[in-house]
Image (cartoon, rainbow, N blue to C red):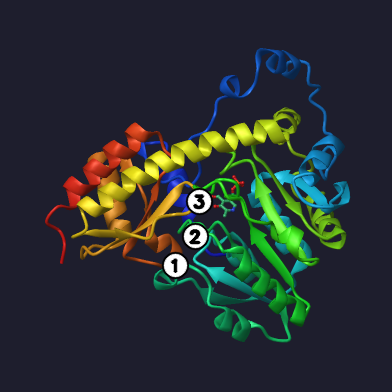
Amino acid sequence: MDIVEFSIERIQSLYENTVDYNLSDSGVHPYSLRELLSSAEIEKLLDVELGYGWTNGGVELRQSISKLYENKSTDNVIVTNGSAEANFVLVMGMLNAGDELVVVVPNYLQMWGWAKALGVKVIEVPLREENGWLPDLDELKSAITAKTKMISYCSPNNPTGSVIPTEMLTEIVNLARQYDIYVHADEVYKGSELDGNEGPSIADIYEKGIATNGLSKAMALPGLRVGWLCGPTEVIERAWHCKDYTSITTSAVSEFAANIVVQPEKRNEILARSRTILNENVAMLDNWVKAHHENYSCRLPQAGGMAFVRYNMGINSTDLVHRMREQRSIMLLPGDCYGMDGYIRIGVGAPKSHLEAGLEQLAEFTKGMNN
Ligand SMILES: Cc1ncc(COP(=O)(O)O)c(C=O)c1O
């Protein structure tokens, strides 16, 4: 199968663990198991039997996840290894060569890459900075044809941190309903909104809405590798059909922890921690951008652990990122990974001291470079 390199993931995997200051992540600085669980829970964890469980996820966990949505049951949910696998089984289960998929870009580009490799025609609808990184509904409408099977967007968005407002979501749903097509939303950053206003899930406002979510980003637990899909039963059934072929089950250890963290009280506690970290760090980034406005500008993120910062130095984003890594031991993500040179993605979910040091170094490194 011909598939393009997933450069967002590859560049991070190659270098993020080799630097002193990793500012390339998009989530919130993770918990350790010790920080996350009480001693009684850790004691219980030691008794977890390391069996297989269910290929669509444990019943108890699916029940708890379904309660995060409105009027959903265990049949509306499949648990996966990270939201990456959720996206994967969705593409494999729902799309065929010759179908059309409308993808709002920039985004994580995983659905985009898989669909293309399968022979699906991918139609891009761009987010523009001057529109607050929100989609233009006329452009979205004109991207739809008789072959369109699904619209896919990511909100809160990777890499810009923009959040599609509820009124606009309603318009997207009305449009999709008119053409009877599925709408998929990658909502893995949902819950990390800086103002604490968590908007509705696509799964709750559209009968053909499918939500990807998981514990890696807003929930700051990427090492658990727990994600899920929530959507119509026929979609979940198709996704399960594929999941049996991929990883069989998620880990029993992760499911144990996931069962604890998706309970409303614990979830709220985790999300409050994420919001505190992000609000402090985004304020710091804002001050930094203002202080270095000759080189940088940024429409600040509304959610998520990343800011998409535009720069006006005459240097390619990948070159800049590699030079920062080699000479300053700081890892950023180049806009090139999204086909958007002239931007860098800066992780604002990193520990404050790391962000502070990274920004200081970046300013010093690029001083005087502006065109
Ligand atoms: C929008 C989005 N979806 C999915 C993923 C995959 O994350 P995970 O598999 O850890 O849940 C990422 C990772 O960066 C992401 O940004």
Q: State the CA–CA distance, disc 1 to disc 2.
A: 7 Å
Give left or right: position of 117 versus 24. Answer: right
Look at 75% across and 75% down and name the residue there. 181
Q: Indicate the amino acid at tag 1.
A: Gly
The x, y position of residue 281, in whole percent, is 38, 41
The x, y position of residue 43, in whole percent, is 72, 13
Circle 1 sits on which residue? 132
Q: Is residue 99 visible?
A: no
- Direction left: furthest residue: 368
Q: Indicate the amino acid at tag 3.
A: Ala
Q: Quadrant of residue 64?
A: top right
Q: Is residue 301 visible?
A: yes
Circle 2 sits on which residue? 162
Neighbor class of circle 3 (other Cα within 10 Å; few <14, some 14-19, many 20+) is many
Look at 71% across and 63% down and name the residue there. 91
Front residue of 371 and 252: 371
Query: With respect to residue 57, does 169 lie above or below?
Result: below
Look at 23% across and 64% down and name the residue there. 312
Front residue of 1 and 9: 9
Look at 44% across and 67% down and name the residue there. 132
Q: State the CA–CA distance, disc 2 to disc 3.
A: 7 Å
Q: Indicate the amino acid at tag 2.
A: Ser
Q: Earlier in the sequence, mark 3 or mark 1?
A: 1
Quadrant of the image for the C terminus? bottom left
Whether residues under marks 1 and 2 lie with C-beta atoms below 8 angstroms apart, the answer is yes
**Numbered label attached to residue 303:** 3
The x, y position of residue 353, in whole percent, is 33, 32
**Numbered label attached to residue 311:** none
Element under disc 2 = loop
CB at mark 2 closer than 8 A to ligand 1?
no
Query: With respect to residue 118, does 330 lie above or below?
Result: above
